[in-house]
Image: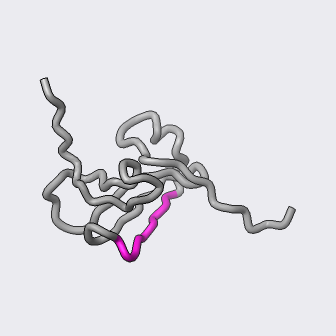
Amino acid sequence: MADFDVRCSASLGSPSVEEGRCQLFMGHDGPHAALFARDNKRCVRSWIGRRPVEVVDRCGGIEQWPWMRGLPMPAWAERQASSAAV
């Protein structure tokens, strides 16, 4: 039996085409979205169009670990550079 991929094909192109692929169903109306983790927080990156010119990140105050163990899964994880001097 063949698997059917029903996700939207729009992609950020970064960090990779597959990781940055819109996680909504194909054929949806409106902005695209991908879930990711930043500094132990869950975030949603949204954009409009097939090749994004501008992206918007919204990060919540909920730690990612309990969220990562369920669904949906973050597409990637990243750390922000510290602005404090060492």
Q: Which residues are magenta?
A: 52-60
Q: Quadrant of residue 20?
A: bottom left
Q: Quadrant of residue 1?
A: top left
Side of 57 relative to 30 (left or right): right
Q: Residue at the location (40% across, 75% down)? A: 54
Instruction: Point out residue 69 in the picture as x, y percentages from the top left corner.
Output: 45, 34
User: Colour scheme of this structure image?
Assistant: one colour
Q: Quadrant of residue 6?
A: top left
Assign the magenta stretch its main secondary structure. strand
Side of 53 relative to 37 (left or right): left
In the image, is residue 83 part of the stretch drawn in magenta? no
Instruction: Point out residue 48 in the picture as x, y percentages from the top left corner.
Output: 29, 71
Quadrant that contains the C terminus: bottom right
Instruction: Point out residue 72 in the picture as x, y percentages from the top left corner.
Output: 36, 42
Q: Residue at the location (40% across, 35% down)? A: 70
Side of 78 relative to 44 (left or right): right
In the image, is residue 58 part of the stretch drawn in magenta? yes
Instruction: Point out residue 35 in the picture as x, y percentages from the top left corner.
Output: 40, 53
Residue extending farthest top: 1
Indicate whether 17 appears above or below 70: below
Q: Residue at the location (16% across, 65% down)? A: 29
Observer-nearest residue: 62 or 81? 81
Residue extending farthest bottom: 53
Residue extending farthest right: 86
